[in-house]
Amino acid sequence: MDGTVTIRDVAALAGVSVGTASRVLSGNSATSPAARERVRVAAEKLGYRPDARARALRSTRSHAVGLLVSDVRNPFFADIAHGAEQAALASSYVTLLANANEDTAQQDTYLEAFLTQRVDGIIVAPQGEGGGNLRAVERARTPLVFVDRTVDGFDVPSVTADNAQGIELAVAHLAALGHTRVGYIGGPSSVSTGRARHEAYLAAVARHGLDDDAELVTVGDFRSASGAAATAKLLAGRRPPTALLAADSLMAVGALGEVRRQGRRIGADVALVALDDIELFRELDPPLTVVAHDARALGERAMRLLLDVIDGRPAASQVLPMRLVVRESSTGRSGR
Amino acid sequence: MDGTVTIRDVAALAGVSVGTASRVLSGNSATSPAARERVRVAAEKLGYRPDARARALRSTRSHAVGLLVSDVRNPFFADIAHGAEQAALASSYVTLLANANEDTAQQDTYLEAFLTQRVDGIIVAPQGEGGGNLRAVERARTPLVFVDRTVDGFDVPSVTADNAQGIELAVAHLAALGHTRVGYIGGPSSVSTGRARHEAYLAAVARHGLDDDAELVTVGDFRSASGAAATAKLLAGRRPPTALLAADSLMAVGALGEVRRQGRRIGADVALVALDDIELFRELDPPLTVVAHDARALGERAMRLLLDVIDGRPAASQVLPMRLVVRESSTGRSGR
DNA sequence: ATAGTCCCTGGAAACGATTCCATGGAATCG
DNA sequence: CGATTCCATGGAATCGTTTCCAGGGACTAT
């Protein structure tokens, strides 16, 4: 009743030794039905809850994994977290979720925390060049999996989206609609998806014979304010784009606002396509055309991959396809 | 270099006893400058990282707190988590974030995990009637704080928003604009904010002499689909409302979509006010009028309150004011 | 010179579980 | 009936750290 009931108390009440109590409670070793029953009753009666730290200390398995996302407030990562969490739960692992807040220092802080907590494995959507504690994780031989993003120079299994294919879908779609000047709102080059999408944009523009004007390329930081700034810059050019492609949902949100503030209309005056789908995009006026990830699947797969690594099973990186969801922000039928 | 370097290894390399090494590394006890230096160098060289579990086991302080939110995918809770996390970090506590997913069973699962992990304290945005593991937390005397929501029958400090005031602001605003039929899209009665807002709505309607037609009240579950369904029901009534008040942002999103699907226009044809502000609402066309929380402050305060409880300082519940942010979804100037 | 302080240190106990090892008794077999 | 096997059990070691306790050496004060 006191909150600090140990296995010793349970054993005493049940009239058995600590060893026997432990065997009953962990459930794997041979015990007599009588002892089993008495221990169970005693544990129930005392409200016994094993101390996970003591257990982990002895048995070198904590049944806890760390998940470090770049920004919890980004619905995309929230969905990844959700998917991962559910998958972990299904294998009775606990997920410790942490938020790097798109900040390398905070990423290091939480990786450090995961290491000292001796989690059984770590999933991270990394940023930066892979210095700092990412190396420490590697040295500590803690099972590691990347999700959504990768870092060069790490031999770590990952689950990512097919960024090249996604961008190609978006550009092809816009090209088919007759656009030749597609403004690109890119992510930071310190993040792998930022780089991959930028390259893919250049390749797709070349492939479809669109204008490859350097003025059409801007760089943001995966947050909405930077999307607004980039959009303002693009629209202020001498020959402004007729379509915008945002490399991430939050920057798309910023673009949305900026276009509206300039008195132009999405869909009718300027087309907009975003990478990442979030629920809200469907409900906008006009609804947003997107190239969608299945964020939840990304999280699920990453977690299953991590559990494979932890249990010593073979683990291969996966690349998930993206798919184009055409709505009215690109076709101009604004429904009004 | 092996990942499993213990304090014993550090002590050996430094040529001191384990006790001395521990004293140096925890930094509080008296040690000689020479020993201090040698131990530090040795620890650095070996990449020593103390085992948090062993440390916590001995010193009955884990420096970890649990934060259980109802739904990470809801930006409101993501912001709470962010605020709480930053506050914890400032006091060098690690936050273990978990997601109840608006599900009582999962809430119990994670409370159980927190208890077995022996966290120093728990913040929860609770749901349900307070059975299950909420009682277990109480029995274990683990410091507990409620955020955003409360549960009757628990003597637990909390940080909540002033729901009554918020709803009153919204209703007064709509009444001043001449609306007499305000449709209410409420939350579940199993959640304290759902109940509080419903009551406040009824009181405000009475106070301002608006129609108190029972047909104007619907109940959702704080997710967007339920907001859409509620809106459909409201708009199909014999005398449909001219304004909608959604008790939460996700349900407002659903309402938004449903209104658009019915070919009506937010702002011009039907006013919409939402509780909770999310970044995106500002960028919509038209921008949404909201009654805003400061979610981040809610999280920060809750965490500081929890740390107070943990350290035995007096802790009093706090109620934070909400504020009305008028945008175009209620005034009808849709900017087009 | 001797007693009393004060610092620093090493060694060992403790935290709460799991797991190894030895043992006693029952059951089986020749 | 004696020897062997087997099962359940108790007791002790162990995980990696902190913390208590006692003691040794240096220093001051008388």
Image (cartoon, coloured by chain):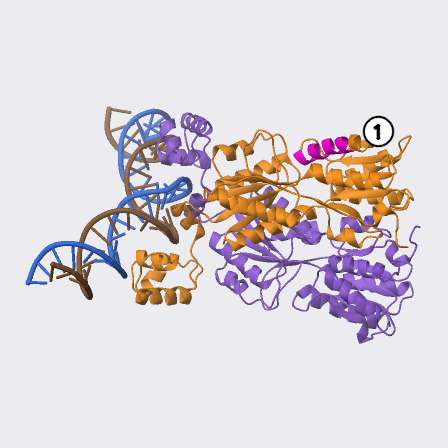
Chain colours: A purple, B orange, C blue, D brown
Q: Position of residue B2 (x, y in %)?
A: 43, 61
Judged left or right of residue D23, residue B246 is right
What secondary structure is marked by label 1?
Answer: helix
Residue at (69%, 33%) from the top-left corner? B196
Q: Is residue A149 above or below residue B175?
A: below
Q: Is residue A307 above or below residue B221?
A: below
Main secondary structure found in the magenta portion:
helix
Judged left or right of residue A129, residue B245 is right
Q: Nearer the viewer, residue B49 or B129?
A: B129
> Number of numbered discs present?
1
Q: Position of residue B180 (x, y in %)?
A: 86, 35
**Magenta residue span:** B192-204
Residue at (45%, 42%) from the top-left corner? B312
Give the quadrant of residue C29: top left
Q: Nearer the viewer, residue A131 or B35?
A: B35
Kindly tell me whether residue B224 is visible in this rendering.
no
Judged left or right of residue B323, residue A129 is left
Residue at (76%, 46%) from the top-left corner? B290
Residue B195: within the magenta?
yes
Q: Position of residue A18 (x, y in %)?
A: 36, 35
Residue at (50%, 63%) from the top-left corner? A136
Residue A179: within the magenta?
no
Give the residue pinned by disc 1: B215
- Quadrant containing the N terminus of chain A is top left
Q: Is residue A248 above or below residue C26?
A: below
Amino acid type, mark 1: Glu
Q: What is the chain identity of the residue bearing mark 1?
A: B
Q: Nearer the viewer, residue A10 or A22?
A: A10
Q: Position of residue A111 (x, y in %)?
A: 53, 58
